[in-house]
Image (cartoon, grey):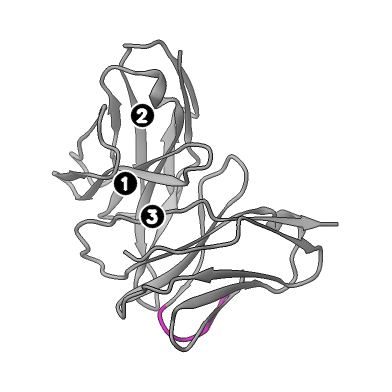
Amino acid sequence: NAGVTQTPKFQVLKTGQSMTLQCAQDMNHEYMSWYRQDPGMGLRLIHYSVGAGITDQGEVPNGYNVSRSTTEDFPLRLLSAAPSQTSVYFCASRITLGTGGSGYTFGSGTRLTVV
Amino acid sequence: DAKTTQPTSMDCAEGRAANLPCNHSTISGNEYVYWYRQIHSQGPQYIIHGLKNNETNEMASLIITEDRKSSTLILPHATLRDTAVYYCIVRVGSLKTSYDKVIFGPGTSLSVIP
């Protein structure tokens, strides 16, 4: 299994441009989510999905759209990039752990700079 | 989900045990304690989790107090590769939790010193 794969690893955008951050997992996980990480602020939840066709907003959804047409893929779209969206973006999917509860597998991140 | 508090930073000598504390005084009965770590520039990595009992795996041990208001992650023989930010979080361990608002605070920055 490749786990959670994010592309691209690095991206520079101009203000107002749009782009899609890709996230794919090959573990058949139902739950997937997007986080952004800014210095000193931990990880903040942007959007999440509990299965194909079902998405919902997290803590900081403004400026981002998601869709979930398949179990494997959960792309994050920036509609009109702003400098405030400069961040590191992580995609995660949820696994089931043997002793109950469930933990996350994270991708390696996409480092986005908006100029 | 309950909030957690952790020290901002800690140092540990290489080869010694690293004990990372976490307070979660408002934890609910159905909330698990999870530990993750994030090595610089990488995605967070799951370490261990538990509900009531102490847990051990190949990476670490988790000690949860009897009242469940605090826990300690133990790395038995710290190496330089264990230098990372360690996050303690609590959340309901339901497979069908519809809104999984997992809050990652700033964590503890552990430096393993040669």
Q: Amino acid at mark 1?
A: Ser
Indicate which disc residue A11 carries.
Answer: none
Mark 1, chain letter? Answer: A
**Left or right of residue A32: residue B50:** right
Residue A114 at x, y percent in the picture: 43, 17
Residue denoted by label 2 = A21
> Which residue lies at the image location 36% right of the left edge and 74% below the top edge?
B27
Q: Is residue A104 above or below residue B50?
A: above
Q: Is residue A102 magenta?
A: no
Residue A108 at x, y percent in the picture: 50, 41
Q: Is residue A60 above or below residue A13?
A: below
Quarter occupied by residue B108: bottom right
Residue denoted by label 1 = A33
Q: Amino acid at mark 3?
A: Ile
User: What distance separates the C-alpha of mark 1 from that of mark 2?
Assistant: 12 Å
| Label 2 Cα neighbours within 10 Å, binned few <14 / some 14-19 / many ≥20 | many
Span highlighted in magenta in the image: B51-59
B104 or A56, which lies in front? B104
Discs 3 and 1 lie in a common subunit: no
Indicate which disc residue B103 carries.
Answer: 3
